[in-house]
Image: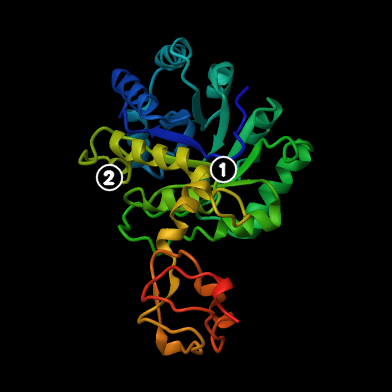
Amino acid sequence: MFRFVNGRATLIAEIGGNHEGDLNKAKDLMFQAHEAGADIIKFQSYSGDGLVNKKLRPDRYNHFQRFMLTDEEWIDLAETAKNNEINFASSIWERRYFDLLDQYICVYKVGSGDLSNHELMKCFISTKKSIVLSTAMSSIDQIRNTYEFVLGQDKTIIEDGRLALLQCTAMYDDPNYRNVNLLVMKQFEREFGCLVGFSNHAIGTNASIASIAMGAKVIEFHFTDSKSSKFRDHKLSFDAVDLRNVVSFNNEFLNILGDSEKVVHSSESSNEKEFRRGVYFNKPIKKGETVQIDDLSFLRPELGIPMWDLPEIIGKKLKKNIAAFEVLDMGLFD
């Protein structure tokens, strides 16, 4: 059973409908995303008949019918993932796909459109697998409703670290970042106490990288091999180059964070004397003269008397003659 990793974010590559109903294309995208470093490769399992009222939305019905895979193709795809040790997942949009694919699915992702579909969600919860909820088009009250429903079905899901809430904004045609609103993750943390993350629908990788820096534990993003393809999801998808860049940042992030204690690291200490300034006389000074600020220069390296100790020698008298720019020590002063 897949468990979210403490520390680094779990990266979910959403193939979704980018295969456009072609099994070989689905496999190819799965392998590309896996090789680029995604932790989980996810699809969407649906049929037009199980998803859309074709009398009211015939165009949407035809779209989903065209993009669907057959049951045999789904098993082929899931077995291919299993045989290649790829973490396979699919958003299940009707009950029969749950029965077909549950044995292969490592994590259940509930898309924003199904946040209210508690009947289907009961199936996912019953497996005790991790569940990821996306929250686009949802008010905080609606999210709370589903959160409380999930906890009512599985009381240990939070303490087991098996529930993640993803901030998500449905912004398919918006090239800007003004509606990403990553700070909502902080609200989720305060109110719900579960894992939080981000489902990316923004163009580019900046929003996802920023979410890692803000502590996202799960990040989902669409994946493609051609951003110029006609279907709308392609243009907001990562390609392999994008994904490798995000993986690189994700892997380095904990090292970048370090810890909360400010210390002088060994790599710094060897440079301290060369970078800090020491106190030197800028002209010859005779024994018995009183040290004045104008007699001094403050220069690298910090040898002898550091500038931290400058107040201690102003107004003191010299015990002997000192040449300009000679290294000083506190024993020279009365």
Disc 2/disc 1 C-alpha distance (Å): 25 Å
**Up-down relation of residue 44 to residue 71 (above or below):** below
Residue 54 at least partly seen: no
For the point 72% across and 41% down, which residue is it? 158
Left or right of residue 312, residue 27 in this image: left
Is the N terminus in the top left, top right, bottom left or bottom right quadrant? top right
Left or right of residue 125, residue 24 in this image: left
Q: Position of residue 106 (x, y in %)?
A: 57, 24
For the point 41% across and 37% down, which residue is it? 247
Q: Nearer the viewer, residue 17 or 60?
A: 17
Q: Identify residue type, mark 1.
A: Lys
The residue beneath circle 2 is 235
Instruction: State the SS at label 2.
Output: loop
Q: Nearer the viewer, residue 251 or 120?
A: 251
**Up-down relation of residue 322 to residue 271 (above or below):** below
Specify few, some or many for label 2: CA neighbours under 10 Å numbering under 14, 14-19, or 20 or more. many
The residue beneath circle 1 is 217
Is the C terminus in the top left, top right, bottom left or bottom right quadrant? bottom right
Left or right of residue 300, residue 263 in this image: right
Q: Position of residue 285 (x, y in %)?
A: 42, 83
Pointers 2 and 1 in contact (CB under 8 A)? no
For the point 46% across and 11% down, which residue is it? 79
Q: Identify residue type, mark 2.
A: Lys
Q: Position of residue 16 (x, y in %)?
A: 40, 33
